[in-house]
Image (tube, rainbow, N blue to C red):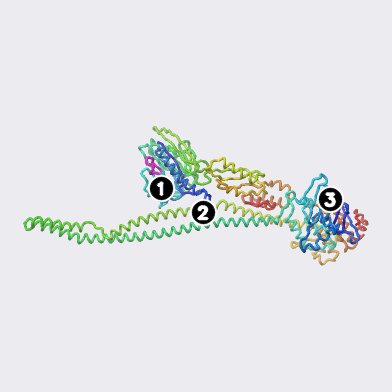
Amino acid sequence: MQIKEAKIYNFGKLQNVSFRFSEGINVIYGANEQGKSTLHTFLVRMLFGMEKGRGRAANGDVYSKYQPWHAPSFYSGALRFEVDGRPFYLERNFYSKEKSDYLRNEADGEELWVAYGDLDVLLGGIGREEYCNTYDVPQSGATTGKVMSEILTAYLAEAEAGGNGKIHVGLAQKNLTARKRELVVEQKACAESRERILDQKQVELSVLQEHAQELSNQIQSFEGQQRELEERLSAQGKKNRSSVKWAVTIIFVLLTLIIGIMTYLKRILPVPAIIFVIIVFMGVLYVWLPRRNEAEELLQYAKTMLNQIKEHLQEDENEIINLQEEMVELQKVSLREVELQQNIEAITLAKQQIEDLSEEYYMEMADELNAEISRWISLLTKGTYDSARLDKNGKLWICTEGREVSPESLSYGTLEQIYLALRLAVGSVIMKEEDMPIFLDETFAMYDDARLAETLKALAQTKKQIFIFTCQKRESDILRQEAIAYYSVNM
Amino acid sequence: MKFMHISDVHLGVMPDAGKEWSKRRKQDIWDSFAEVILEAGRQSVDFLLISGDLFHKQPLKRELREVNYLFGQIPQVKVVLMAGNHDYLQPKSYYLDFPWEENVYFFKGEEISAFDFPEKNVTIYGLSYWHQQICERLYDEFDVSDEKRINILLAHGGTEKQIPFFPKQILEKGIDYIAAGHIHKAARMLGTSAVMAGSLEPTDCNDTGPHGYWIGEIRKEGREVFGGLDFYPVKKCEYKHEIFSLETDTTQYELEQMVKKRIEDGEAYMLYRIFLEGYVNPDANIDFSRLDQMKQVVDVTVNLQPDYDYEKMLKEHPDSLLGRYIARMEKQPQDVVTMKALEFGVNALLGHNICR
């Protein structure tokens, strides 16, 4: 991105002014209180927007600081810039009650929409926070490795994938975890509802089995009774047969004979004799005729009961078989459960792979980043320190004379340079999509002339658009001395 | 000789558990059976052949009494039946000592035996299942005793675990008609001489197509066999599997109207399983459960792919996390889980719904 022109209608102390800029180094020179910082803030806010803080946060925030005193509703300006050689025009009104923006491709006149992310695309997806922590370098540019590693992590987590919109690795991971949890809950619910039905069937089954057991017991007891009764009856039968019945019969035969003889001998009249014989005969009949006694009735009852109970038992046994088969069916997992299990496994795999990949990606980025930091440190310190690395915990280490030292042990000036190197290195990694301009606001106040010269030479080599805001003539002088082309803006 | 052939009635089954029509269907199956028996009487067939699985489970005594009563209504028809793999004979089965009406002939043995009807010149061979699975080829192990009779085999199975058999081999033994059951789809296995009756009514939402009963006639003069055979559908219920192909721009209402239209074009007695195929915009978020709740819909199976062009994504962003993820997942052994993982991971990375 190249910023071509800034038109300020009303922003802080600046009103109706416009500035033109050139590619390469722009030195914006002005004495104190001339509006250098206002211009700097305007440029950054034009690109990245500005919201009014709420409540107490509004006190002393950037919005209030640069709010025009006399015409608060006319808090606006415009910017011309180029992206990949295409010219764009951006206009903003920052006034919180009438916030508006207008973006246009000046080559074809096509209107674009800030609200729909068109500007974000032009900025290569870089957010204000990332930008302010890297290419927007303030007076004391101290930053920590921790902040840088956070920016890198965040960058990775929201790494852009070109035309497909943003890839949110962090969000993706979170969503995968959440969806997996939902699926596990559903899976459990499925299993539980099956279990519940199975439990019900199990209860039915045990009731049936208990009942069947009871019936078997009854059958046993009735069979016992039946046997007992049968024995008793057969014992009775034998007794009857052996003693009484035969005795009575023999007596009857004897009596009949005696009476017959006596009738023959005419001792007895035939009629009473016949009557007598009939009476005795009936007695014998009485003895011999089968009689239903109590035992026999009981036996009959036992037999009927036994049949009925056996039938009940058979009914139970059939129902038990049906229930058992039903339960076998119920134990099979449903299609949905199979699908759920597959989905859970797939999500687990996807999550694991994305985690591995983003770690791999981070490690690669770390290599690239360390090379970039080392290059910058070497450039800025003219080879005094030639390598540095950011460790996993975000701590920066400087290599000197074969050992790693913490930057805090170096001189203040060197430290400033190292932090600048870190900002530029991280910036160049995260701003690969779009080469953004570098803002240096009184950054070199603490540099000696030699260091400043080295730093400016190094910056000139980057071919990036650079804005140096300064209240001193030193930068211009050195640039001239070193024969580095620059564009001068006087406030 | 005129006969009616039915099978796999599955009395007692309750299809589509959880659906509002589930109970009605259970009753419908009983009713259809009763109606078909009366129809056999009206058509004055000589034999009613029931090729197994009359009951879905072990029949209870009262159920057998119901069935026996119905058989008693058509005393002039000889009912020949067997137990199949669902209502197989276990030692306590009521089938074993049930006092059938005089016109009912039930095969009790697990080996082939025969009922001979000299007055009709018919012999019917058959057996009953004593187990849920029988892998032996029991129908290969018998011979026809009199080739002049009209010889019928009442068979159940024909699959790997339920007495496998080849109709042609059995017909070569001198059988004139194989009255088969077990497979629920009605089909002529070999012309008019071997028929898989199919279930009288569909008993599961995967029993698609028409269901019903067969009526046939066989005449035999010497060894020449003549006959005809017809299928009569019972139209109480028919399941249909309907596939809908979605385009990436198909909307919720469009889909609902497509389904509604297809259902309205069909008969009122039809029930539908809906299958959705094709590609869908991952942003579309169509609510498929609304289809599930439509009348006459049994269930909805969603086999939709998000319309990602993985190769294109890979080519456009080879070094981005997305590109690397696609490349890595494509290198994995391709199975259901890895293919799903590819889709879900891309969904997640692009911020779409992950999965159904």
Residue holding disc 2: A330
Mark 2: which secondary structure?
helix
Q: Chain of mark 2?
A: A
- Tag 3 residue: A81
Tell which tag, 1 or 2, sits nearer the viewer. Answer: 1
Which chain is mark 3 on? A
Point out the image quarter for the N terminus of chain B. Answer: top left
Region rendered in magenta: B68-80
Nearer to us of marks 3 and 2 is: 3
Q: Position of residue B92 (x, y in %)?
A: 40, 53
Quarter of the image for residue A137 reads bottom right
**Dot 1 corresponds to which residue?**
B66
Of the numbered discs 3 and 2, the one sitting upstream in the chain is 3
The amino acid type found where label 3 is placed reads: Phe
Q: Are marks 1 and 2 in contact (CB under 8 Å)?
A: no
Residue B8 image point, x, y percent: 46, 45
Are marks 3 and 2 in one subunit? yes
